[in-house]
Image (cartoon, rainbow, N blue to C red):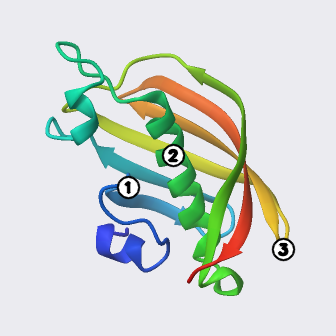
Amino acid sequence: MLNQEQIKEIIPHRDPFLLIDEILELEPGKRAVGMKHVRPEEDYFRGHFPGQPVMPGVLILESLAQVGAVAVLCLPENKGKIAFFGGVKEAKFRGMVQPGDDLRLEAELIKLRSRAGVGSGKAYVGDKLVCECEFMFMFGQDK
């Protein structure tokens, strides 16, 4: 549905910290499903961990948050805003994400107010759930 260039029109993240490659499904203000193609040349694999590369859990959480940000920042009333992390609750990691994996990221908005919100996220490799969490965010203005 959205490629990386179209995603950049909605959220302010850029390389090397734009952690989603495409949006597959989008219900503005409600939910989004994104994809991260985990490439072997990702810089973080050099040190996490040599000999057994694993995508850091915090980057999986950030990827989920970015998909949630697309769902909320595509609304006309949120154009030009940034969704900042306010917190992460109940994060659970249930599997590893390794080079070559396609990470499917599902984010649903639970509560949305004018200045903040709450969402839930689930990340999958194939049909295997590898991470789930609840995240809080606050709005700020883009510069």
**How far apart are the two marked residues, 2 and 1, measured between alpha carbons?**
9 Å
Tell me the element at label 3.
loop
Q: Position of residue 77 (x, y in %)?
A: 71, 85
Q: Earlier in the sequence, mark 2 or mark 1?
A: 1
At label 3, the amino acid type is Ser
| Above or below, comparing residue 84 to residue 121 in the picture | below
Q: Position of residue 7 (x, y in %)?
A: 40, 70
Q: Which mark is residue 99?
A: none
Disc 2 and disc 3 in contact, CB within 8 angstroms: no
Q: Is residue 3 visible?
A: no
Tell me the element at label 2.
helix
**How far apart are the two marked residues, 1 and 3, measured between alpha carbons?**
26 Å
Image side of residue 126 versus residue 81, left or right: left
Residue at image position (69%, 73%) is 140
Residue at image position (31%, 57%) is 21
**How far apart are the two marked residues, 2 and 3, measured between alpha carbons?**
22 Å
At label 1, the amino acid type is Phe
Residue at image position (60%, 30%) is 132
Crowding around mark 2 (Cα neighbors within 10 Å: few <14, some 14 to 19, many 20+) is some
Tell me the element at label 1.
loop
Q: Which residue is mark 1?
A: 17
Q: Which mark is residue 62?
A: 2
At label 2, the amino acid type is Glu
Image side of residue 17 versus residue 91, left or right: left
Q: Which mark is residue 114?
A: 3
Disc 2 and disc 1 in contact, CB within 8 angstroms: yes
User: Residue 82, located in which quarter of the rendered image?
Assistant: bottom right
| Above or below, comparing residue 139 to residue 36 in the picture | below
Residue at image position (30%, 61%) is 15
Disc 1 and disc 3 in contact, CB within 8 angstroms: no
